[in-house]
Image (tube, grey):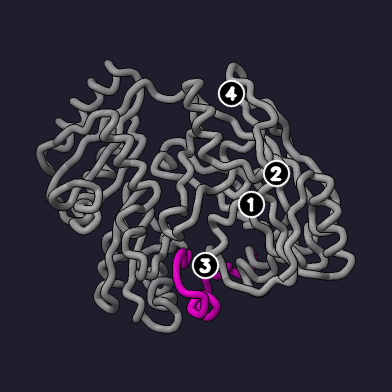
């Protein structure tokens, strides 16, 4: 494999132009924290963007930040924290799951990352304001802008979210940032089984208490994060008097399920970082891991259906709508893909992504959810428009795109 490390956006464009002219497929990496996410393939050339790092614009009073694509998320978060601000969508890190370093800001958008706060704030695509990049012809482009209200017509910046480098190479990204909460508290309900736990989480989400995190940890996951048994968790953030008042209301609402325990701001921060990065599953390095999105109430029965066939462990985020599932490595050549996607169809629909597995299994299984015909046709048209020669990460997401 040939490695190239462009140091400027112009050098990125030149590298992609050369690859387009020679019809040479490119693998694209920022900090390579998610290189194992997607189908494996052998690229002739690797485009290493790690030199494109640094904040190019930060206006705290305007709630806007721009940075080169390979700027580490940790750098961004430290800068924002020093100014009492944050990326509200709470992007998860794959570092623990893959044993890598921090992710990049551009990779965050291209994977459309989000953490527990997605139930309140949305994902990366909901906070991006603008991008600069290079398409598969080697042509530089920019979309969006650097002001919060600059959204008109087709939003290309959001359209690239979740494309994993298959449509364009990002060189710079602009995000909306928001003030950090003054404090936080977590309400913990001990000992609930998954079905009752999700009922409690859904009841909390339907109450006017502004929950910003809703997760259920079964015993194996709860013990890894410091609880003696299963824990059903709800996070409240804001000004101290408001958090205290909402906590009391929420505890009263959920009293029929279990007595509430309270974690303070420091303990909450540590806990939700562990939930965000799926720390209990990361410790089990040999396990195959799936990320499954379904309707919240479908999470527990879906996990139970799968557990009848394969030994598995599940933890639940997003009020039950996000299921992280860990399998033993002997779950078949497709890593349980047929069973999982069949169960999803039975339980109301959704999608599943194979997040961690050996290369041979990722090569044999469909890593991303197969697309229905209309969506697949749209994806193919977008690929043809942005990358007509098929050189950008070909086959990483869908073999036919």
Give the residue at x 44% y 42%. Answer: 118
Q: Earlier in the sequence, mark 1 or mark 4?
A: 1
The picture places residue 18, in percent across and down from the top left corner, at 87, 61
Q: Are circles 2 and 1 on residues that touch, CB within 8 Å? A: yes
Q: Which of the two discs, 3 and 4, labels the residue nearer the N terminus?
A: 4
Q: Could you say whether the residue bearing mark 2 is in a helix, strand or loop? A: loop
Cα–Cα gap, marks 3 and 4: 35 Å
Residue 209, visible in the rendered structure: no
Q: Earlier in the sequence, mark 2 or mark 3?
A: 2
* Residue marked by disc 4: 63
Q: Which mark is residue 397?
A: none
Task: Tally the numbered discs.
Answer: 4
Quadrant containing the N terminus in the rendered view: bottom right
Q: Residue at x 39, y 72 (%)?
A: 340
Residue 52 is marked as 2
Question: Which label's residue is closer to the chain start, 3 or 1?
Answer: 1
Would you call the spot at circle 2 few (<14 residues within 10 Å), some (14-19), or many (20 or more)? many
Residue beneath disc 3:
369
Q: Let me know if residue 63 appears in the view.
A: yes
Relative depth, front residue between 227 and 337: 227
Q: Residues within 10 Å of mark 4 (few under 14, many from 20)?
A: some
Magenta span of residues: 352-374
């Amino acid at each position: 494999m040939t490695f190239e490390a462009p140091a400027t956006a112009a050098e990125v464009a030149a590298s992609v132009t050369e690859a387009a002219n020679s019809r040479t497929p490119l693998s694209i990496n920022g900090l390579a924290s998610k290189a194992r996410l997607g189908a494996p393939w052998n690229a002739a050339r690797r485009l290493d963007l790690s030199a494109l790092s640094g904040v190019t614009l930060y206006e705290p009073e305007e709630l806007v930040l721009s940075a080169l694509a390979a700027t580490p998320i940790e750098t961004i978060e430290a800068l924002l924290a020093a100014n009492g601000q944050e990326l509200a969508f709470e992007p998860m890190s794959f570092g623990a799951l893959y044993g890598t370093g921090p992710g990049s800001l551009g990779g965050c958008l291209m994977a459309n990352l989000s953490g527990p706060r997605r139930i309140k704030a949305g994902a990366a695509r909901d906070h991006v304001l603008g991008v600069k990049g290079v398409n598969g012809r080697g042509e530089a482009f920019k979309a969006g802008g650097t002001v919060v209200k600059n959204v008109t017509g087709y939003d290309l910046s959001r359209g690239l979210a979740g494309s994993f480098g298959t449509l364009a190479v990002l060189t710079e990204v602009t995000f909306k940032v928001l003030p950090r909460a003054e404090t936080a508290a977590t309400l913990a309900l001990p000992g609930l089984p998954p079905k009752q736990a999700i009922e409690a989480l859904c009841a909390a989400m339907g109450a006017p208490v502004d929950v910003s995190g809703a997760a259920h940890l079964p015993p194996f996951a709860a013990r890894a994060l410091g609880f003696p048994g299963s824990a059903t968790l709800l996070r409240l953030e804001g000004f101290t008097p408001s958090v205290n008042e909402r906590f009391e209301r929420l505890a009263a609402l959920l009293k029929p399920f279990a007595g509430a325990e309270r974690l303070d701001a420091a303990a909450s921060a540590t806990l939700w970082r562990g939930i965000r990065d799926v720390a209990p599953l990361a410790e089990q390095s040999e396990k195959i891991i799936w990320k499954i999105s379904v309707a919240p109430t479908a999470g527990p029965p879906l996990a139970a259906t799968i557990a009848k066939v394969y030994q598995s462990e599940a933890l639940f985020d997003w009020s039950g709508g996000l299921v992280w599932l860990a399998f033993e490595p002997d779950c078949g050549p497709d890593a349980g893909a047929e069973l999982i996607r069949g169960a999803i169809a039975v339980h109301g629909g959704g999608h599943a992504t194979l997040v961690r597995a050996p290369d041979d299994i990722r090569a044999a299984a469909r890593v991303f959810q197969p697309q229905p015909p209309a969506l697949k046709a749209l994806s193919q048209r977008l690929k043809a428009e942005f990358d007509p020669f098929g050189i950008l990460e070909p086959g990483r997401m869908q073999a036919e795109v």
